[in-house]
Image (cartoon, rainbow, N blue to C red):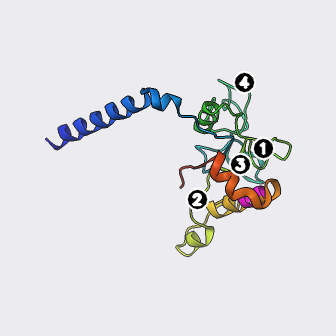
Amino acid sequence: MASLCLHKESFFLLVITFAYFSSPSAAQTKCNIRSVYQLGDSLADAGNVIRTPGASIIFRANQAPYGETFFRRPTGRFSNGRIIIDYISSAFKLSFLNAYLDRGASFSQGVNFAVAGATALNSSFWAARGIRLPTWNTPLAAQLGWFKSHLQSTCGSNCAQTLRSSSLIVMGEWG
């Protein structure tokens, strides 16, 4: 009985959501997103881990079959094609996000800070519990540091207003 009620509630929410997004007012709403920033782990990594010393030995996203379907070459994404953030960027008519550690890349429409194997908590948390992490672990705090550094170098003191008005910040899954 509880299972049946849960299915009815889920169906009801699905119908309401569909009705909202198919309504004329929802279709006329314009999002003014001009940049996207991604933090996360392997589900969102666009190539940072393959540029991290020592990590590319373990994480082989720079070799086939990764990237075969869409890009026709390995990109550092843990997918044979695009990852979720690529679809989100495309929905806003933005280019795919480049990996922060790709120094030759353009970051004009956002940056991908995600790194495969990243944890939400710092290595010190794990060490205190007798758990040793690889040296290339890039936890949330490190990615936030990269984000702060990137913003300081690109938009200075106007960042808060710029981010609030025209950016999407996506926090991915964490180990």
Q: Residues within 10 Å of mark 1 (few under 14, many from 20)?
A: many
Name the kind of residue labelled 4 in the image.
Arg
Alpha carbons under labels 3 and 4: distance apart: 19 Å
Disc 3, SS? helix
In the image, 32 versus 58, the foreground residue is 32
Q: Residue at x 72, y 43 (%)?
A: 47
Q: Which residue is mark 1?
A: 107
Alpha carbons under labels 1 and 2: distance apart: 24 Å
Count all numbered tags in the image, as a single digit.
4
Q: Earlier in the sequence, mark 3 or mark 2?
A: 3
Name the kind of residue labelled 3 in the image.
Val
Q: Earlier in the sequence, mark 4 or mark 1?
A: 4
Q: Which residue is mark 4?
A: 72
Residue 36 seen in the current view: yes
Please provide the residue range marked out in magenta: 146-151
Mark 3 near mark 1, Cβ–Cβ under 8 Å?
no
Disc 2, SS? loop
Residue positioned most to the bottom: 128
Q: Which residue is mark 2?
A: 119
Q: Residues within 10 Å of mark 3 (few under 14, many from 20)?
A: many
Q: Which residue is mark 3?
A: 49
- Quadrant where the N terminus sits is top left
Q: Position of residue 68 (x, y in %)?
A: 68, 25
